[in-house]
Image (spheres, rainbow, N blue to C red):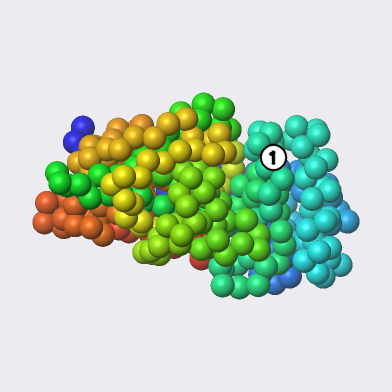
Amino acid sequence: MSWSQQMLKIVRQCNSFNQPESPRALCVPFFIKDQQVGLIIPEIIPKVISETDVFEVVRSKQDPTLIRKIKLTDDFDTVVKRTQTIREILEGWRKQDVHISLRGWRNELYSVKTFYHEATLLEMERSATSLFGVKQYGCHLNGFCKTSDGLSMWIGRRAKNKPTFPGKLDNIAAGGLSAGMTVKDCIVKECAEEASIPEHLAKEAKPVGSISYLYHSERGVFPETQFIFDLELPSTFTPQNADGEVSEFYLFKIEEVKEKIASGEFKPNCALVILDFLIRHGYISPDTEPYYLLFLQEIHSTLDFPFSS
């Protein structure tokens, strides 16, 4: 299999929810007020329905056995009320070991909203967001340096005790966007924790766009958008992990990085972040890469609701 074919396979792995064999037809739209904010996965629909004081089930008039949507009841009319109520339910599910995703409980809240620029409607425990298929946002940094023999990129290896993708290669710094945090604050925080990049240097990171994709796994549905930053690091700088989430760092030539992102050694979405870097910096050309347009299309998937149809 060629590099292009291997890379396309990984790109489509990150968009597996768009494939015919995905569970999308079994998911139920999740609403707060009159706005769709997610897709509830089939495994937890019975648990959601059982919470009759919290969730309202809207059924098809033609066929009452079909659920058109599930909405948070209008009794919960503030972000604080919604957040507290959902947290209590999720903590109960966690104790009951209702779903594998809740075993990775983070004590970290994500904002639930229809679009990034819209107001927050609910703050939800990070590990549960995939159960409700709500949009998740994060930040990733491409840390690179220029030497006499070309461009190189710093790559981290995820610690083996990480709950997701242990031991896989990763960007030099990356992390989820917690509720109430700005994108810039997030990348500066992750730079310090994951690579000991000093604040004055981290603040030089340039926002260069985003990637979006939509996948499913045994942990649920993940409509994700990653804000991407590029940072040219001094040739004398060597990253050091400070939070225990990275086991080691490597400085790879950009040509070697390109080969590795198609090999399966990387956490899949990190491979997409680097693919985006390679395209933006001209290391992948439309005249030589047969899947150039497919790559661009798949790493910028539309996540506007409803994406259940």
Residue at image position (78%, 58%) is: 83
Residue 215 horizontal/vertical position (percent): 48, 46
Residue 255 horizontal/vertical position (percent): 20, 41
> In the rendered view, would you say 28 is above or below 161?
below
Residue at image position (55%, 57%) is: 186
Front residue of 140/214: it is: 140
Total labels drawn: 1
* Residue 24 visible to an observer of this rendering: no
Front residue of 134/206: it is: 206
* Residue 243 visible to an observer of this rendering: yes
Residue position for label 1: 105
Q: Tell me where residue 229 sits by quadrant.
A: bottom left
Outermost front residue: 236
Q: Residues within 10 Å of mark 1 (few under 14, many from 20)?
A: some
Residue 221 horizontal/vertical position (percent): 56, 47
Q: Is residue 45 left or right of residue 283?
A: right
- Kindly state the secondary structure of the residue where label 1 is placed: loop
Residue 286 horizontal/vertical position (percent): 16, 57
Q: Dividing the image into 4 quarters, which one contains the N terminus?
A: top left
Q: Is residue 264 left or right of residue 133?
A: left
Residue type for callout 1: Trp
Residue at image position (12%, 51%) is: 288
Q: Is residue 223 left or right of residue 52?
A: left
Front residue of 182/265: it is: 182
